[in-house]
């Protein structure tokens, strides 16, 4: 049975069995010869990095990707032993924490590389690093035409060891793949140039979830999936290529139910007026829980297996729904914000559409105020 937390009934259920299933789909896609670095940055896309990483490590994940050093330190605190790569930039003043926690930095600037080399030599330690190549994303990384200025820098390294070279796709969720193809080609050119200069890093990686599913030529020696581990398809076109199971369900209960006359205004700013006598439920959650304010008068929740609309503006801590058409709706009824109830499902993608955003932002926005509770659907 799924445990139900006490107190305010707004919480996320995280199904670790679904997570294991999704990880195995990655494994099947890439085969045994390719390593999997599971991306657990931003608190494992809102799912809770500690429990997610422990489960994935147990399932066989070879490494983990975080954004910041602090996220890496948190993984060590919960006992993660596998390599952890800090993907979103490294700051030399964090060098001691990097060493103490055996984290791997991604390097994008020759100056940072030189600085790190000096620090490692002064401490008489050897440090592995990954080099980030910008093949078309236009954010961190060196651009392929700068490779000749990097080669002499790599030649001077004694304390630093080049363990990985990687790049990131800018867009490959759509059907059109020519830009991604160009990115893979540019990456290949950099790898060949490094190889001819005698640098063969064991870990070469580029594929995020969409690459894992639909672009085998981007698998190289390691892949970096995030979204698909959490059971979300990178794009509707990929549904036929892999079966994923959503990991997170977000629920609450009706806090108060009241019948109001026609013409009543609901919430701040009178943006919603009842067009008939209505049954309005108030939910104990709001934008401070990560329930986007853009869902005001646009979002939908599930009550008794039926869809009920959000009415009026989402407040900081409370949100109203119209349950006039839901038979027998009662105070205390379970409300599903994300996930399945009866035959109905609200996916992170659907909620993202209502809030003019993407599933990644929906998941990573669920705030720390919402307790995450873990269970395994296998045991149900
Ligand atoms: C550098 C890097 N690699 C991999 C990923 C994982 O991407 P996805 O969640 O689409 O699999 C991300 C996600 O933003 C990323 O920034």
Image: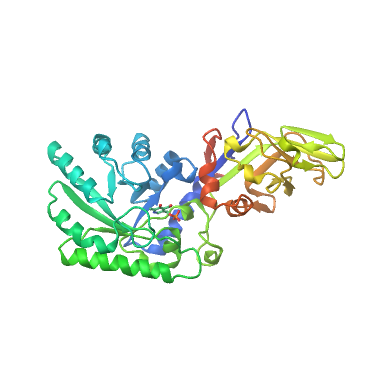
Toward the top, the furthest residue is 7
Horizontal side of 318 relative to 37 (left or right) equals right
Q: In percent of the image, x 71 and y 35: which residue is there?
A: 268
Say which quadrant the N terminus sits in.
Answer: top right
Q: Position of residue 60 (x, y in %)?
A: 37, 51
What number of labels is visible?
0
Say which quadrant the C terminus sits in.
Answer: top right
Q: Position of residue 85 (x, y in %)?
A: 32, 47
The reply to whether residue 378 is visible in this rendering is no
Q: Position of residue 343 (x, y in %)?
A: 69, 54
Horizontal side of 94 relative to 170 (left or right) equals left
Q: Quadrant of residue 144?
A: bottom left
Q: In percent of the image, x 34 and y 52: which residue is there?
A: 140
Judging depth in this view, the residue of 161 and 112 nearest the camera is 112
Q: Position of residue 88 (x, y in %)?
A: 36, 47
Q: In percent of the image, x 14 and y 46: which residue is there?
A: 159
The reply to whether residue 219 is visible in this rendering is yes
Horizontal side of 37 relative to 11 (left or right) equals left
Q: Quadrant of residue 96?
A: top left
Judging depth in this view, the residue of 340 and 124 nearest the camera is 124
Judging depth in this view, the residue of 296 and 350 nearest the camera is 296
Horizontal side of 54 relative to 83 (left or right) equals right
């Amino acid at each position: 049975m799924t445990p139900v937390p006490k107190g305010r009934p707004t919480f996320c259920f995280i199904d670790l069995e679904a997570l294991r299933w999704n990880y195995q789909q990655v494994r099947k896609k890439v085969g045994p010869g390719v390593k999997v670095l599971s991306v657990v940055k931003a608190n494992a896309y809102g799912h809770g990095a500690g429990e997610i990483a422990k489960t994935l490590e147990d399932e066989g994940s070879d490494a983990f990707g975080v954004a910041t050093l602090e996220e890496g330190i948190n993984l060590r605190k919960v006992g993660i032993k596998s390599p952890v790569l800090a993907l979103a930039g490294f700051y030399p003043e964090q060098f001691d924490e990097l060493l103490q926690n055996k984290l791997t930095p991604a390097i994008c600037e020759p100056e940072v590389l030189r600085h790190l080399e000096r620090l490692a030599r002064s401490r008489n330690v050897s440090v592995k690093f990954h080099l980030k190549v910008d093949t078309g994303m236009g954010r961190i990384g060196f651009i392929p035409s700068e490779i000749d200025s990097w080669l002499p820098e790599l030649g001077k390294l004694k304390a630093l060891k080049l363990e990985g070279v990687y790049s990131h796709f800018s867009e490959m969720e759509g059907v059109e793949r020519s830009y991604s193809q160009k990115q893979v080609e540019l990456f290949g050119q950099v790898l060949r140039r490094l190889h001819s200069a005698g640098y063969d890093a064991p870990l070469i990686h580029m594929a995020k979830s969409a690459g894992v599913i639909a672009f085998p030529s981007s698998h190289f020696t390691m892949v970096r999936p995030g979204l698909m581990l959490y059971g979300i398809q990178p794009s509707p076109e990929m549904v036929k290529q892999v079966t994923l199971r959503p990991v997170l369900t977000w629920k609450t209960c009706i806090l108060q139910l009241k019948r109001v006359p026609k013409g009543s205004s609901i919430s701040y700013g009178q943006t919603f007026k009842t067009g008939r006598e209505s049954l309005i439920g108030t939910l104990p959650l709001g934008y401070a829980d990560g329930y986007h304010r853009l869902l005001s008068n646009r979002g939908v929740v599930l009550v008794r297996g039926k869809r009920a609309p959000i009415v009026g503006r989402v407040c900081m801590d409370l949100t109203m729904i119209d349950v006039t058409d839901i038979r027998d709706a009662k105070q205390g009824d379970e409300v599903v914000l994300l996930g399945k109830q009866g035959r109905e499902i609200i996916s992170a993608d659907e909620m993202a559409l209502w809030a003019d955003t993407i599933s990644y932002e929906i998941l990573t926005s669920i705030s720390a105020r919402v307790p995450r509770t873990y269970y395994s659907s296998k045991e149900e």
